[in-house]
Amino acid sequence: MDLPSSSHFLYIPAILLIGVMLGFVVGTRAARDQARFTTQREAERKATRDARAARRAAKGATAPAEPEPEPEPTPAPTSEEGAA
């Protein structure tokens, strides 16, 4: 059984490095596209909400108020706190 030639010691790491670089480039593009899509979708949703509010205001109906956030529950006293 012959050992692989010395070119394998250069070829295999080089191919791995190329794969890592290509993965980085493709992943960066995908992340950038996803961020752009999310920003665009949020802008479209805001425009739709604003248009809906304008239609309601034109009809004379009041737009529903923003719901108030629920207050955070107060934690129950522990046995140590209750003893004090």
Image (cartoon, grey):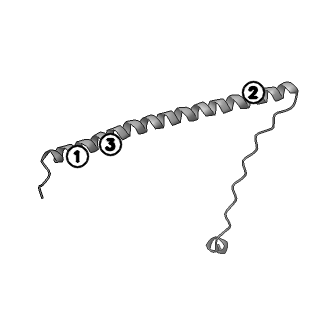
Type of residue at label 3? Val
Q: Quadrant where the C terminus lies?
A: bottom right
> Alpha-carbon neighbours of circle 3 within 10 Å: few (<14), some, or many (≥20)?
few
Q: Name above or below for residue 75 compared with residue 31.
A: below
Residue at far top of view: 58
- State the residue position of label 1: 12
Element on which disc 3 rests: helix
Q: Which mark is residue 20?
A: 3
User: Residue at the location (12% across, 47% down)?
Assistant: 6
- Residue 20: where, in percent of width, then height? 32, 42
Seen from the viewer's position, the closer of residues 14 and 5 is 5
Element on which disc 2 rests: helix
* Mark toward the viewer: 1 or 3: 1
Type of residue at label 2? Ala
Position of 48 with respect to 34 (left or right) is right
Seen from the viewer's position, the closer of residues 79 and 23 is 23
Q: Name above or below for residue 21 compared with residue 80.
A: above
User: Residue at the location (88% across, 27% down)?
Assistant: 60
Asked if the residue at tag 3 contacts the one at tag 1, i.e. Cβ–Cβ closer than 8 Å, the answer is no
Q: Earlier in the sequence, mark 1 or mark 2?
A: 1
- State the residue position of label 2: 51
Position of 3 with respect to 29 (left or right) is left
Q: Which mark is residue 75?
A: none
Q: Earlier in the sequence, mark 3 or mark 2?
A: 3
The quarter of the picture where residue 45 lies is top right
> Alpha-carbon neighbours of circle 1 within 10 Å: few (<14), some, or many (≥20)?
few
Element on which disc 1 rests: helix
